[in-house]
Image (cartoon, rainbow, N blue to C red):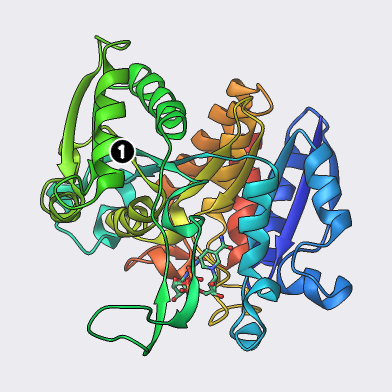
Amino acid sequence: MKVAVLPGDGIGPEIVTEAVKILNALEERFEIEQAPIGGAGYEVGGHPLPDATLALASHADAILFGAVGDWKYDRLERELRPEQAILGLRKHLRLFANLRPVICYSELTGASSLKSEIVSGLDILIVRELSGDIYFGQPRGLRDAPDGPFYGSREGFDTMRYAEPEVRRIAHVAFQSAQKRAKRLTSIDKANVLETSQLWRDVITSVACEYPDVELSHLYVDNAAMQLVKAPKTFDVIVTGNMFGDILSDEAAMLTGSIGMLPSASLDANNKGLYEPSHGSAPDIAGKGIANPLATILSVAMMLRYSLGRAEQANRVEDAVKSILAQGYRTMDIATPNCKKVGTQEMGDAVIAALAS
Ligand code: NAD
């Protein structure tokens, strides 16, 4: 099976190196090919998503992605900025379902900004629609306001839109995910204000008839943001649109102690996927050897499970991560008093040692 490895920028290469080490430490051999993307792609090919990188990603069975972005590219025109690479990949590969497990490991409850009784044992799955919504809706742009109280002033505008089949396909992913867990699904929208959300709610409710074993509830996004910090353990699976999911999943990330712990999978209709940590390229700590590689290593576990059909290997990697946390290994972002403080590379080595034991 072929895995395309796209390290990207900032801490991307550092954390991906550790994740690839894990992949290579498994008994089974995977064909691994690497290509530049983001700022690194721009430097070599003048575009954040070079043709050769896109071709490699298109033909691979799965993609392991680090992170893209650096402040030094902020002055480039939007289409050439590193972040466009990930949007381009999602679009070309028709990746519409983003799965983000939010798990608070018992050893890390102290690293969360919330009281440990609120987060201890937390296990949520966020299913975020990835290909529609205001991030992709047309028309969008900058113009002189054609009407209204600010007529003639420069204004920016975007279009939030969802089509019924788009909502239906993500609904099925969410209901089926809930069936494999505690069978509770919360759909998050803003149906009291937005037409897009009203359609979203109607479609989710209609799909629910096909999954009578799953208990469905709806929440407005503002209330959901509150509930996530007030009583996060009341959630099992969450399904939501692209923008609300973007924001809520970062909020949820902090419940676990560090965004450096959160893996993610972005899947197409055939479970081909792109796997990446939920965080960005962290330019503030790039090159220092202190980034937490566990989100990327746990993304490898998701890749083994969802795209490579190796659930047993996925469990092994996840168990190895739990084991090194239990042994006290911590990178700076999750450090606690008396822990074994390690850098990126030592953390990867510790996971490999746990895999072998
Ligand atoms: P970020 O996630 O990169 O960093 C936020 C904070 O979390 C920083 O303090 C950083 O040091 C810390 N952090 C992130 N990952 C960490 C890790 N593995 N270990 C320890 N600490 C970690 O978000 P940002 O600072 O808003 O964005 C930086 C760049 O990343 C920007 O260019 C942004 O556009 C880009 N970005 C890329 C992606 C992606 O590639 N999918 C996602 C989000 C942001």
Amino acid type of the residue that numbered disc 1 sits on in the rendered structure: Ile
Residue where numbered disc 1 is placed: 124
Q: Residue at x 30, y 53 (%)?
A: 252
Q: Residue at x 54, y 28 (%)?
A: 315
Judged left or right of residue 4, residue 104 is left
Q: Position of residue 214 (x, y in %)?
A: 25, 17
Which quadrant of the figure contains the C terminus?
top right
Judged left or right of residue 236, residue 142 is right
Q: Residue at x 38, y 28 (%)?
A: 171
Quarter of the image for residue 58 reads top right
Q: Does the image show residue 345?
A: no
Q: Please say if 67 is above or below 215.
A: below
Q: Helix, strand or loop at disc 1?
A: strand
Q: Position of residue 54 (x, y in %)?
A: 80, 51
Q: Under 8 Å from ligand 1: the CB of mark 1? A: no
Residue sitting nearer the eye, 19 or 92: 92
Q: Please say if 95 is above or below 270.
A: below
Q: Please say if 292 is above or below 213.
A: below
Residue sitting nearer the eye, 349 or 310: 310
Judged left or right of residue 136, residue 310 is right
Q: Position of residue 271 (x, y in %)?
A: 61, 27
Q: Please say if 175 is above or below 8.
A: above
Furthest-front residue in view?
A: 147
Q: Does the image show residue 273?
A: yes
Which quadrant of the figure contains the N terminus?
top right
Residue sitting nearer the eye, 314 or 283: 283
Q: Position of residue 352 (x, y in %)?
A: 65, 44
Circle 1: is it few (<14), some (14-19), or many (20+) Cα within 10 Å? many
Q: Residue at x 17, y 53 (%)?
A: 193
